[in-house]
Amino acid sequence: MKQTKHFLNLSDLPPDELKAILANAHALKKQKFNPPQIFDGLSLAMVFDKRSTRTRVSFEVAMKQLGGHTIVMSMDEIQLGGSESIESTGNVLSRYVDGIMVRMSDPAPLAELAKHSTIPVINGMTDASHPCQIMASLLTIEEKLGSIEGKKLAWFGDSNNVSNTYAEAAPLFGFEFTLSTPPDLKPPPDHPLFKDSRYVKYIKDPKEAAKDADVLITDTWVSMGQEGKDIEKFWPYQVNAELTACAKDTAIFTHCLPMHEWEEVSEEIARSPASVIYDEAENRLHAQKAILAWCLQDAGVHVQQGQLDLGRGA
């Protein structure tokens, strides 16, 4: 029996598999106006416990453009961990649909759902990680700057699920990731993110962190559920013209959105030619297609001769 291919954390997959998914995302984007109908007859259940724009739209359109169907449910509409056990929910959904995408705060129920599902479960986002977003980000960087390998990425502001996943991706894809946050938000030295100092490091001084960077990255200082949070300590870490001047002349700026205007990034930079935030938003769609293709290829996906190599890895 083939092992179910869940997409929960980047570190669960070998680097060759991840690179194959990224390569397929590039290929699928090239076919954006003539998408192959590789999900014909397949269905994806999408479960949300948080509001969503990009995750919902990108997954729903990705599935439908490639010939599949979606069922969208909020946590109020599904008995996930409520009156019905997670084990039972996983077993039941496995009989109805071909895959499950979940966007929820707590990663523990997501892992438990995957354990009891015989169909792929995809992490659409948790408070701990955001692997689909990072695949879209890397797709965007490669479009603009070439191979991600050897690039220097610098993160400014808060430390969150997105920065965690960039750090997780760095040794897998071979890029350098520098985290620059207020000192009280610095992860401890023994944190798993810092297990390989060749790829991941912390630098308190944002200008030093930005020096010779290929990519400048930030995220909102006030995430969903953190309304009223004190942001005073973050102002030195705003991505603005002064900070950008420390990076390479060819550096680009990314932000996974939504953006708080104009807190974590100045309007000058967000609207500059260096900003690729909307290219990155679009690439959620193409990255999601490639992730779904990797997950679903053993669940009935058949690619016509010469259409696509779905990247089964080494």
Image: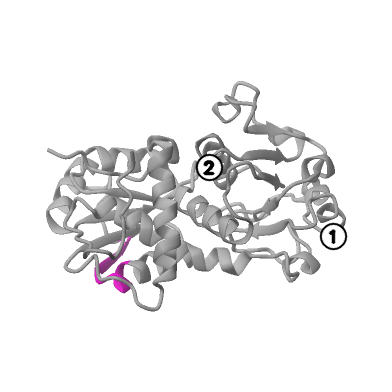
Residue 66 is covered by the magenta coloring: yes
267 displayed left or right of 16: right
Please, what secondary structure does the residue beneath circle 1 have?
A: helix
Is 120 left, or right, of 178 in this rendering?
A: left
Mark 2–mark 1 Cα distance, whole angstroms, equals: 26 Å
Helix or strand or loop: what does disc 2 sit on?
helix
Q: Nearer the viewer, residue 100 or 37?
A: 37
As displayed, is residue 109 above or below residue 71?
A: above
Say what amino acid the circle numbered 2 marks.
Thr
Q: Is residue 52 visible?
A: no
Q: Disc 1 marks which residue?
A: 241
Question: Counting other residues with Cα less than 10 Å from the Cα at mark 2, is it few (<14), some (14-19), or many (20 or more)?
Answer: many
Residue ID at (69%, 36%):
185
What residue is shown at x 31% (from left), y 54% (from top)? 310
Q: Position of residue 149 (x, y in %)?
A: 58, 43
Residue located beneath label 2 in the image:
165
- Identify the image quadrant of residue 159: top right
Structure colour scheme: one colour
- The answer to which quarter of the image holds residue 13 is top left
Q: Quadrant of the N terminus?
A: top left
- 40 sits to left or right of 223: left
Residue visible at 22% across and 48% down in the picture: 83
145 vs 186, nearest the viewer: 145
- Residue 283 among those drawn in magenta: no
Give left or right: position of 287 versus 213: left
Q: Which residues are magenta?
A: 63-76
Q: Give residue 89's position: percent from left, percent from top.
A: 20, 48
